[in-house]
Structures are given as structure tokens and as C-alpha cells.
Amino acid sequence: MFRKPITATLLRAGLLLAGLATLSSLAAADANAPKAHSLLDLVILAGPIEYLLICLSVISYGLALNWTFTLKREILVPDRLVDEVYNTFDAENPPTDEDIEALRNSASADNSMLGNTIAAILDNKELGFESMRDSMDVASAAERNRYIGKVSWLSMFASSATLGGLLGTVSGIIGSFLKMSANPGGVDPNMLAANIGEALVCTATGLGIAIGNLYFFFWLRGRVNQCALDTAVIANEVLDYFRPR
């Protein structure tokens, strides 16, 4: 279901990175400073670790944007199903067995957080109230973990980007010291430019990925938690109808 949005997002992100690199390279082509490094030059000098971080950036932000448009309340807790639940369990018009069965079929066909939870409750209607309540608890926890597990990848990407940037920093510093130790008489600063660029660019890239992904992670996690709370409220109202009087 997410394949086409992810592919389109990755393509846009790749084109954006290429455009930014091209603009930076053109801006750095100053006649009075022919040796100035553009952003693209620094990325190339940073080496393999920077390339991996750029790939991680495209993947992580692509998924974050995709989940921004797919993990929404109208998808996880669809209004159509909410209205159907309240119309079925109307206090003034008690539902018939046919009404409850129709709602169960509708919830089973709706692969949303609310739909799966309601279906789990009504599937155990014949087993009694305790079984229905246990099914609701299990289904609610499973649905929340299902979506939290997705957005948790962003937290992992943030941690990986931070450590990747640190790895690039350490690698660049080690390279600089190795060059200095190999030339005890003095080292031309230009010889160290590649290693210093690797250290600084990798650090900046890693922090840029980590900061953005953490914002997306906490924001999307809050959205999922709110949907889980709304689902629990509606599910409990359904369960109250079957509570022994």
C-alpha cells in the first residue's frame, strides 16, 4: 500500500538533493576564490560515510513524509465507522442481532485501528463479556504497537545518523593526524582539507538527519497515541452495551 508513495517521495528527495548540490556548486564558482569548495565538493571529499548518510537521509525523510500523510486520524479512526458504531448502539433504538452483525462485518472489512478493535470485540460476542473485554485489550495493544513500531524506525534512523556523523568525524580526524605524522617537517593545510571536510560535513549531515527525524518521530508518535486513545474510548462504549446489568 505504501510502495508508490515511498517511491515518489524518494524520487523527489533525490532530485531535491541533486538540485541543491548543483546550485551550491555554481554559487561557489567565484573568480576571486578559485580554490573554494562547494557543498558538492565537500560531500565528495567526505567519502563513503557521507554517501551512506545521504542515503539514510533520503530513506528516513521519505518514510517520515509518507507516514505524515498515511498515519492520520481519518485513516486510523475513520469517521464513517465511528458514525456507524454510534448509530448501531443508539440508546433510544437498541440494536438487533442483525445490526450488530452488520457492524461486525463492516469493522472486519476496515483494516484500521478502530476497525480491528471493534471486530475483535464483536467476534467474541457469543463467549461473554469477559472474553470481549480481553479481546479488546489485546487488539488495542496490538494495533497501537503496529503503528508505533513503524514510527519507531525514525528514532532508530536518528540514532544511526548521529553515530554515523560521529564515525565520519573520527575518521576525518584520524586521517588528519596520520598525514601530520607522516610529514613531521610540516603539512600543507591543503593536504588536510579532505580530512577536515570529511569530519565537519559528516557531523553536520548526521545532526541534520537526527534532528529532523526526532521531530517527526515524536510528532507521529503523539498522533498514534491520540488515535489509540480515541479508539479505546469508542471501544469501551461498545463494550458497555454488553456489560452485565
Image (tube, grey):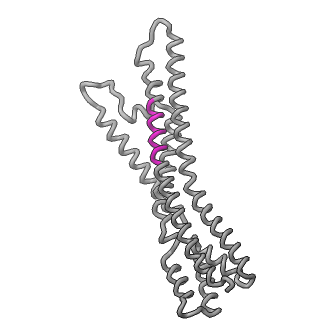
Residue plotted at (43% across, 51% down)? 13
Residue furthest top as drawn? 185
Residue furthest right as drawn? 127
- Residue 79, percent from left and from top: 48, 77
Which image quadrant for residue 27? top left
Which image quadrant for residue 140? bottom right
Residue plotted at (73% across, 85% down)? 126
Can residue 180 be found in the magenta stretch?
no
Dominant secondary structure of the magenta stretch? helix
Can residue 206 be found in the magenta stretch?
yes
Q: Is residue 164 above or below residue 177?
A: below
Residue plotted at (35% across, 41% down)? 22
Q: Which residues are magenta?
A: 200-212
- Residue 95, percent from left and from top: 59, 91
Number of numbered discs on residues: 0
- Residue 59, percent from left and from top: 51, 50
Give the quadrant of the N terminus: bottom right
> Which of the two residues, 241 or 60, is positioned nearer the viewer here?
241
Residue furthest left as drawn? 32
> Which of the two residues, 233 or 156, is positioned nearer the viewer here?
233
